[in-house]
Structures are given as structure tokens and as C-alpha cells.
Image (spheres, coloured by chain):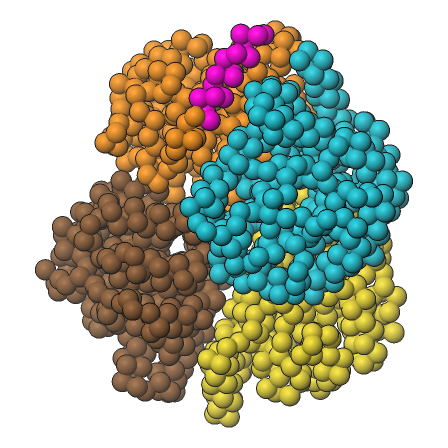
Chain colours: A orange, B brown, C yellow, D cyan
Amino acid sequence: MTQTITRNTRGVYVISATPFKEDGTIDMGSLDRLTDFFIEKNVTGITILGMMGEADKLTPEESRAVIDRVIARCGNLPVIVGVSGSGLRNLADLSRYAMDKGVAGVMVTPNRGPAYDDRVESYFHAVAKALPDVPLILQDFPLSTGVPLSARLIRRLSLDIPQLVMLKHEDWPGLTKITAIRDMEKQGDGPRMSILCGNGGLYLPQELARGADGAMTGFAYPEALVRTVELFQQGKQDEAEDFFDAYIPILRHEQQPGFGLAVRKYVLKQRGMIACEETRAPGPRLSVVDRAEVDRLMHRTQLRLEAL
Amino acid sequence: MTQTITRNTRGVYVISATPFKEDGTIDMGSLDRLTDFFIEKNVTGITILGMMGEADKLTPEESRAVIDRVIARCGNLPVIVGVSGSGLRNLADLSRYAMDKGVAGVMVTPNRGPAYDDRVESYFHAVAKALPDVPLILQDFPLSTGVPLSARLIRRLSLDIPQLVMLKHEDWPGLTKITAIRDMEKQGDGPRMSILCGNGGLYLPQELARGADGAMTGFAYPEALVRTVELFQQGKQDEAEDFFDAYIPILRHEQQPGFGLAVRKYVLKQRGMIACEETRAPGPRLSVVDRAEVDRLMHRTQLRLEAL
Amino acid sequence: MTQTITRNTRGVYVISATPFKEDGTIDMGSLDRLTDFFIEKNVTGITILGMMGEADKLTPEESRAVIDRVIARCGNLPVIVGVSGSGLRNLADLSRYAMDKGVAGVMVTPNRGPAYDDRVESYFHAVAKALPDVPLILQDFPLSTGVPLSARLIRRLSLDIPQLVMLKHEDWPGLTKITAIRDMEKQGDGPRMSILCGNGGLYLPQELARGADGAMTGFAYPEALVRTVELFQQGKQDEAEDFFDAYIPILRHEQQPGFGLAVRKYVLKQRGMIACEETRAPGPRLSVVDRAEVDRLMHRTQLRLEAL
Amino acid sequence: MTQTITRNTRGVYVISATPFKEDGTIDMGSLDRLTDFFIEKNVTGITILGMMGEADKLTPEESRAVIDRVIARCGNLPVIVGVSGSGLRNLADLSRYAMDKGVAGVMVTPNRGPAYDDRVESYFHAVAKALPDVPLILQDFPLSTGVPLSARLIRRLSLDIPQLVMLKHEDWPGLTKITAIRDMEKQGDGPRMSILCGNGGLYLPQELARGADGAMTGFAYPEALVRTVELFQQGKQDEAEDFFDAYIPILRHEQQPGFGLAVRKYVLKQRGMIACEETRAPGPRLSVVDRAEVDRLMHRTQLRLEAL
């Protein structure tokens, strides 16, 4: 049984893709290979069933099967599960299933609807009440959810809901938000929260410099995230950033909303991690031109790394 | 076995609520009573698992159970099933299940995402391809989906996808859209489509005057919809509108987005159709003040009807 | 010189349309007639240069000319001026001009952008700082601005900004928001704020029952608003609502977003208040079918009033 | 007098910032220096009064003063003017003023409102009708306007409106849109349109490879855009991309929506082009931490360039 996440969790929790076969069913063999790949790259943990894991297109049975499969493969490596969805009842059922299997925490976005701060606050209190003792991660991703949250609302949730221990930070722009939260934590009495950053890692060095604890994102080169965080934590900021910058051209390509998932799965396929790049419909897919473009960016990334 | 819907379907397809017990499980007894109530009020058909049926908060098993229950209770009355969701695969599975049970058609919204006309068009072609021969209803409800569709895009879909036979019209404002579609149909060669109107019926007399074929909505007084459509089809427009106007004060109250579902379920409970007014979380619920307000509006509606 | 608005302002502040000639210039003669019409209907005050006054399509010179003209015509009747716009500098210039001319206060929406509560809060503090001593009205109209505000944020702004004395309430749904604000005011120490309601008045009787102080909206039958508020303030709620309900069918027609302005201007023209119904481009305009529909609704309203 | 833009215009049209003094007035001296800087960096033309020029916070007088000043400074260098705004009348007035002064074309976004393709189409026809013979640029920037346009709608506008000669492309993701437009142009009979790319240039090499004609954006290192486009047009794609990649880390920082304008103006100030980095309220401003972060990115960009 793995440890659950805490307010001091650090490192890289990679967001796993969900590989499918040509016929649209989940490719469990590729999922194993992908899990092994992540472990081999020394990630701190794996997050499954996130937005980029196409969780909203799976059946409940498929979601549980993914949890079972990854947990079985991971050993002691912590696993986080995205459980966001339209109904609190379904969310709670999936969360309980996952916790029983030994996952380290569950990740929740604000539910869809107008961005009233009190509506969002009530929702997270309801989630916490439905899931006593389950470690919660707040995913703050307004570009996708349509629900912007202020730094002070996040701080209030962190203080009022003891089990809400982590922020998956992917607001954009979001750098000043990290600073604002860390400042409030320093000035106040309550505990800090762990902050892991998303958005592919596009601003990872800046985020780490401002007090983030690591990354939680699915960039198809997770080794870039791992090494950057390591170097940073060793105090080698320049070295970290020199290294990380080599990946930014392809990262900014993968970071295109909607379209980027197809890029990511194609890169994972080209790197041998999954057998088939297909996303479930409706989802993005690459044309011949798109693929050649990604091939070129992969090649250029390789050249750049060799030149470092 | 019931008949499927066609491009000439007329009448009132009432959107059914999904009743829950205090413990949050589906209240099948109340669902039966509600179904009987609709039949007794002479609706043309029943639409289940729509947005106001809280379909997105049910599990697939629950959705199938609702289909089974309503179909069994309905006899020859046609049933339409809302099947919208994030993944085409799940949508197709539920649709096939429903069609096998004998429903009259399935209703689909544009999938979430930016409102590119070509994105929406591709999506409906993909839906149609995944569901050959299944009668499709396009639900056009931008206030909820965030995806506005032009009249000409709807006309093109109607022409290019023979099985797309009906529009659930609830754009707002939407009156000129009905006129635009009917004008294109008159001027062009292809077939018309059936247009049933939503939005609680707030503009029903105007919509019928512009060429709509009836209503598909869940107003807690379905008899108002039924009689208005009947009178209209008998050419008694003034009488229809005099009658319908008596309901507009409470209808405009039920029509408040998000909040309105709680009003509707409360009225249905007060009218004896369902045992418990609860919506599944996260969902609206009424305060003591809210309930007294609805009681007053119900009472005033009653007085007004008596005075007609 | 008129009195400025206060936290206890009550009554009906009608939102004035801006009449244009066929050639698109402002029709000052019609503006006079419209002003006289409002005065004759016993409104408490007039609000000019609101959204439905097409303020964003006027030049600064035209805006100042409208202020001058209406102020000159109004005598002691208080005038409120909408000053919302993209830049604080322009907003402050127009506000100062208007205050110098003797208006009773200025109305401001949250500026466009993501709905972070702290962003909105900062904005109103900046507005207040730029306009010391100017009475401010917060217009809360998320359907148009895209910026939802919670009741507690509005209460906080009311407490922290002494000159923010009034809420133009037109959130939708918004009834529970009025109750929430009035409850916070009763439980806390600070002063109340005046609440005048918009949305054409669609829920005016319910809003008054929940503690609103009147209406600020541009329904083309302002006498309906005036008499309803009067009767309410005399404690005659049933009578008020019986009277008001007669207007709801045409009111719900005028209340269609975007399109409704063309309905309103057409009704004002048919009632003889303005010479030309045109809106400035880009703006809605009525077809022959649309006009006949409005004519019918006007006629039916008349019949209904006669039958009361 | 300069030449107007055409369907074959190529190169780099830099989007100019509008410099302000500490007191908030326009800093005409800095505007001159900035104009000289752009000319010195060999841009093809200058675009003023765009979104990032804070055009919506200027008065009409200020807008005209900016046009006069830049035109006077530019000599034969073509100038494009952003004229988007709420009212067609004001848009036309500003456009005519600018054309009389000798600008090369005017740039227009779709007006705010729901993204119906026919609404957008009507709008551009109305703009064209109001401005006969004026060369028009369609700015396609849904992240800011909220109005997504399909490739086929853009192609239709290009065909039906002869004077609509250029697309400012900044949809995101938007690479496949360029390919789609170029494919339609190859397959059809009508003329091509010029495509210049925005978004800071974040995907400029990819966009050029797909058939774009250059850039129209305000990246604070315009020399990066100029040289990249030049190298590309000489067929040196690898060299172009090697060069451009050096700028991506700071470019992705400047590309943060809303916040990025403060970064851009700070860099321009640090580079000596403008005296004061302030934006007009409400606008972004940098903290001490933010400034240090940008300083670091500027320094790293310098080091990287030296190492090329």
C-alpha cells in the first residue's frame, strides 16, 4: 500500500494518457508499457484518468479497469486518480473505489457553471463531506473548465478543508497566483499546500522559482520534467533552465489546447510507448502534414539535446 | 413496438424529470406515477434522460434502468432518449440499447468546444455514421451548450443527414431562426424537418405561429402545452394564446436557468406526481422562501385558470 | 440641482433608449419626447447611456450631448448615467462631466475579463478612487458582461466602498441573491444598499417581495413598473401582481437578449414616443413578421388591461 | 503616399504598443522612438491601435493623434490601423480618417456576440459596404474576441468581399487552419489572401512552413520576426528555426494573455524604446518579482543568441 499525498508532496506526477487500440478499446498492453516507461524515467507518481487521459469518454467499468491495471503495475509508486464529473454521487463512487485500491489521492475540478466564488466553495465542501479522509487535489484549469478561481479562494479552501492538500496549478497566466498563495501562507497561520504545475510544464522553471513543488502534467518527455525539478531542488537553477529550454519548442507545440493531445499520443507512439495514437471520438487526430511537423520537432529536440 | 419519429412529427413530447428518493437513488415508483401523469395529460410522447432529467449525473446502469421502466409503462406512446455525452462510443452504446428497446429516436447536442460550424457539422456526421438508421434529434440549446448554430447550418445538417429528422429548438432568441429554417425549406428542394420547441414553452404561441410543430419541454404543467398546441392546430390561435398566457407567470419562474429544475420538481411534488423534490448534487434546491414563492405562483395560476 | 442617489433610493429609474434618425444621427427631438413621456408616467428618475441606450456605439461627444439634453429636460428629476467602458480614464472623464452637469450618480459594470473575485474587487476600488465622492451603482448583469459576482462579493463591495450605494440587480437567476444580500445586511453592522432591478422587470413582483427597492429597466411600458412598485409599497401585493402579470407576455418578448432592443424601440415608436425604431449597426432590426408579432402582443396587452 | 496592402502582402507588420507617461497621457516622444526602432529593425510595416496597443482605452482624439504621429514618422513604410469597436459608425469614421492620412489598410475583428457564422458574415459585409475600396484585414483571434471562425467561413469572406485581402491569423490552435485555407485556395478558382500571423509569433516557423506570408504581432524583439521570415523566404528553414528557437523561452512568457502586455512594455523599456512601462488602467502591471523574472529571461535570451 502506497502513502497518500500530503501538503508537502514534491516531485513529478506524470499525467498518463489512456492508450486505445484501432478498434477503440483500451490497449492494456500499451498502458503497461507506458506505466513502465514512466517508472523508468523516475517520476514520483502517476496521475491517471485526467482530462488528457480522456476520462470523460470512458465507461465507469473502463475507469475502474485502468485504475486496477496501473495500480497493479506500479508497486509502491503513488497513483492519483482524476474523478471529476457531472454528479457528486458518481464522483464519490469512483473515488472510494480508487482509495480502496490504494491510490494516493483524488483530483477534482470545480463543476461546470458560472464562476461564483461561493458556488465553487460550496462544491468543494460537498466533495470533502462526501469523501471524509480522502486526500483531495484541486485542479485549477480555467481554460478548460471555464471557472476562474482567485488565489484567495484557493487559500480559503486550503485552510477550511484540511484534506484539500494539493493544488494542480494550471491557470494561465498563473505565475503571480503561485506567488500570491505562497505569500498568504507565509503571512498566515495555517498550513501550506503542495503545488504541482500543469500546462505541459510550459512555465515550469518560473513556477519552481516561485515556490511550486514540482509538476503534474503529461508532456511526452517526462524525463525533461523530472530532471528539471531535480536540478532545481539541488539549487542548480541555471542548469535546470538550460536543460529545460531545449524542450520548449516541442512543448509549446504539444500545449495547443484540444489539438495537443494528438501530438502527445503521436510522440508517445514514436517513442515506442504506445501502439496506436488514436484518441476516442470526438477527439483530435493528425494529418500527414501534422505528423511531419511533429517528426521535425522531435528531430530538432534530439539535435538540441545532443548539443547541450 | 412504437413508431419512430419522422420529419412530420407533431405534438408535445414532454421532457421527463428523473425523480430521486431522499437517499439519492432513483425513485422508480415516482417515475411510474410521473409517466402515468404525462399519459393522462395526453402528451404525444415522452423524452427521458434530457438535461433536465439530470442524465449527466446517472450511471450507465441507471440510464438503462430508466429507459426500461418508462418504455414498459408507456405502451405505444413514443419515447425519445437524450444520449448526449462526452464520448461518441458511450453515446452510441446507449443509443443502440435504447433503440433495441423500441424508442422512437435519440436526441443529441453538439459536443462541447469552440463553435466552429465545421466542427459541429463533422460531429453530427460522425454521430450519424455511428448510428445508421437511428432517427436523430438535434438539440439546439446554446445557453447550456455554449455552441450557437446558425439557421443555415441546421438546414445543411437536415439536408445532408437524412436521419436527422427533428430539431429541438431552444435557442434564445430563437423566433427568427424558426422562420429562417421554414423559409429555406420552402425555397429549396429538400425535405422539411420537424421542429419541437423547448425553453419551457416560454414562446410557444409565437413559435407555433412561425411554423413549429409542437413542444418538447418539461414545464410542470404539461396540460398547458398540450391544449395550446391542440387549439393552435385547430386554427384557434387567440383561444390558444389566451389559455397559454395564464401559465406564463409561473412558466417564466420555472424557466430560470439552473434554478428552474428545483422549481419544476417542487411543483411536480406539490401536484402529487413525485414523492421527493431533490435533485442530485450538485444541483439546485429551494429554501423556505423559495418554496413559499412557488406556492404563491401555483395558487395564482389556479385562480387565473378559474377566471378564464 | 438634483439630489444624488443614496443607499435608500427607491422607485423606478427607467432606462432610456437612445433614439436615432434614419441617417443614424441622434434624434434629439425624439429624445425630448421620450423624456417627457417618462416624466408623464411618473418615473422616479431616468438612467441614460446604459447598455440598452447603445452607449458603446456613441462617440464621447454624442454621450455628452445626450447628458446635456436629458438633464436640461428633466428639471429636478434625478438622472443616472451609465459610464462603463474599456478604460478607467475615459470612464472617469465621462463621470466627471456628468456629475458637473448635476446627475445623481454613475453606473458601472465589472470590466471584461475572467471572473476572479479579486480582479473585480480591485476594479471597483480603482473606480471609486478615481471618482472620489461620486455615488456609484454596480450593474450586476452577467448574461451580458460574462462576469458573475457572488452575493458576498457584492456585500463586501458595499461595505468597503461607502460611495457604492446601489445595486442594479439583473443576475439571472437572481432572486436568491437579493435575499442573500438582505440577510447579510440584517445580520451585519454595516449599512444596506439600494437595490433596483433590471431584466425588463421580468421578476419584479418577486424581487420586491424579497426586499428590492424598485426597478431600473427600460421596459417600453414604464407605467407598468411604476404602478407595480407603488402598489407594492402600499402593501397591496396581490393587486400589484395582478396588474403586473398583464404585461408579462409582452415583457417576456422584449426580454430576448440582443433582439429585445429592437422590440422595445418598435413599441416606443408605435406608442408615439420616438420617430424611428432603428438601432445603430451592428444591432437588431425587425422583419415584417417580427413587427406583426409585436403588434399582436401590444394589442393583446391592451385587451388584457381593459379586462382587469 | 504609401501603397495599400494586397492579397500578396508579405513580411513583418509589427504591432506597436502605445506608450504612456506616468500621468497616463500618451508619450509621443516614446512613440517616435518606438517607430524609429521598428524601422531600424527593418519591419515591412507597422500596425497601430491594435488590441495590444490598448486602442479600446484611447479617446477618438487620441487615436487620431497616434495615427498622425506614426504616419508622419514612417515615411513610405506602410501603416495598418486597428479600427475594431462596438459601433460600425465609429469604426467607419476612424477608418476614413486613417485612409485619408494614407494608411495601407484597416483591421477589424468580428463584433462581440454569439458565434453564429451568418452573424459574423453579415457583419463583415456591412463593414465592407460602409468602407468601399478600403483594404480590410480580418483579425481572427477567438481567445480574445470569443468568436471562433471556421476556415471555410474565412475562405467565403475572402471570396465574397474582394477588398478583404488579408487575414491576421491568431487562432489557437491554428496551424491546420492555415493549411485548410491554402488548400481551398489551391482547389478553387478565386484569389488567395495574405496571411500574417499573430500570437507573438509563438508558432511562426510552423506557420510559414504551412503557407503564411509573415507575421503581424508585437513581440518585443521584432528583429527575431524579421530575420526568421527573411531566412524562410530564402529557403533556409533550418537556419530560421534555429535562430527563432532562441527567442521562444521569452516569447512564451510574453504570450501570457492579459499579463503579457506588461511584459512586452517592460522589455521595450529595458531595451530603451519607451520611457515608461505603464499600461492604462485597467491593465496588467509587474511586481518586483515579475520584473526580476523578465530580467532573467532577457539575460538568458542574450546568452543564447551569443552562443548561436
**Residue D113 pos. (x, y %):** 56, 58
C137 lies above or below A111: below
**Residue D198 pos. (x, y %):** 62, 39
Magenta highlight: main SS: helix
Q: Tell me the quadrant of the picture where the C terminus of chain A can be found.
A: top right
D302 lies above or below B230: above
Please tell me which residue is depicted at 53% across the width and 83% down the height of the picture.
Answer: C243
C64 lies above or below A200: below
Please tell me which residue is depicted at 73% across the width and 70% down the height of the picture.
Answer: C48
- In the image, the segment drawn in magenta is A293-308
The answer to whether one can see residue A221 in this image is: yes
Camera-side residue: C265 or B249? C265
Q: Is residue A304 magenta?
A: yes
Side of A299 relative to A229 (left or right): left
Please tell me which residue is depicted at 74% across the width and 60% down the height of the picture.
Answer: D96
Side of D62 relative to C43 (left or right): right
**Residue D280 pos. (x, y %):** 78, 45
Side of B193 relative to D215 (left or right): left
The answer to whether one can see residue A185 in this image is: no
Q: Residue furthest bottom?
A: C306
